[in-house]
Image: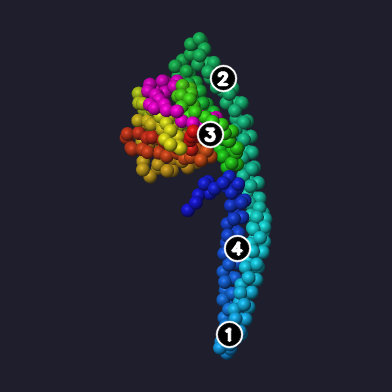
Amino acid sequence: MTQWRELPAGLRSPRIRLALTIAGILFLLLVAFSVVVYLLVSREVLQDVEPFRDDPLFVEAAHRQLAAYGMQLVFANIVGVVLIGIASYFVAQAALRPLEQAIALQRQFTNDASHDLRTPLAVIRMETSAALHSRTPMPPDIAECLRIIDEQTQRMDRLIEQLLTLAHVDADSALNREPTDLRHLVSGVVRDLRPLADAKEIALSVARSDPALVLGDELKLSQLVANLVDNAIKYSPNSASVSVSVWQQRDAAFIAVSDTGEGIRAGDRENVFRRFHRVDSVRSPNGRGGHGLGLPLCRWIARAHGGDVFVDSREGEGSTFTVRLPALTA
């Protein structure tokens, strides 16, 4: 069965898809009705011809009449298909308008709420950071409270970033496509996230770095890789290892992020790509799970580029998330 996301961009519009579905159903009904009409007409004509079946001229005239009826039905079906197409589009438009308005309002609310939350969070982070780095001594319990506040504020900041991206996911937002070397992109992400790995004494490395060129949005692809590496660091125990690999094979480019964490249960491996789904009991040994948005965003970004994200995991041994993207070839 052909997936909607494999169709040309113009046919992936919900309005067009619904119109095509309605038109297809009506077209099948029209064809079935025409066949029944033709069979009934043929039966009547042949019954009328039966007493004169020995007269070749009469039989030939009857067959010409049936052919004329058939052509009339074909012409009527062509006109019907045009009318069905027009009617289906307007019906789909009317049916989807309330849903589109509701989605637009929800997206606007998410945008507004996320932007409004950023300012107080920035103030909180600034104040806690200033207090933690102050030369004035403070009681250990107060310092620990400030550290927890700073840590949770960072988590909320990441959640807001993901919500802002989610606000545009269902809008089929345009990608700023340009030739992008995944090798350099991965190198930059690993460099930026190395302090997070060092804080947990995790060995973060690039295991394979082959040239891999894709036509994509560098910012969104960086977010995809950063989410996967951040997850690997977050769900790995202290002193573990996380490796990132990038390579190209024929017309496909690959990025793999592997960790030595607790792994994912077999029944949860596909569920991790569902929004707001969390498997903290397995993936988060420290009890600090995510919000269930990072991996769904990764899959959306990959599929928006014509690729996908897959996971291979074994409980107690770790997980490997692999991104496959269409590659630019010479």
Residue drawn at (61%, 55%) of the image: 19
**Residue 293 in the image: x percent, y percent?**
50, 37
Residue at the farthest front position: 56
Q: Dot 2: what SS? A: helix
Residue drawn at (63%, 78%) of the image: 65
Q: Is the residue marked by circle 1 packed among few (<14), some (14-19), or many (20+) residues within 10 Å?
A: few
Q: Is 181 placed above or below 76 here?
A: above
Q: Earlier in the sequence, mark 1 or mark 3?
A: 1
Q: Which residue is mark 3?
A: 215
Q: Earlier in the sequence, mark 2 or mark 3?
A: 2
* Label pair 3/4, CB-CB below 8 angstroms: no
Q: Which residue is mark 2?
A: 126
Residue drawn at (45%, 28%) of the image: 211
| Label number found at residue 175 | none
Distance CA(mark 2)–CA(mark 4):
62 Å
**Residue 237 in the image: x percent, y percent?**
36, 28
Q: Which residue is mark 4?
A: 26
Q: Earlier in the sequence, mark 2 or mark 1?
A: 1
Q: Dot 3: what SS? A: strand
- Give the amino acid at mark 1: Pro
Q: Earlier in the sequence, mark 3 or mark 4?
A: 4
- Which is closer to the viewer, label 2 or label 4? 4
Distance CA(mark 2)–CA(mark 3):
38 Å
| Highlighted magenta segment, given as a residue range | 194-222
**Which image quarter: residue 262?**
top left
Inspect the magenta stretch and tell me whether residue 196 lies in it.
yes
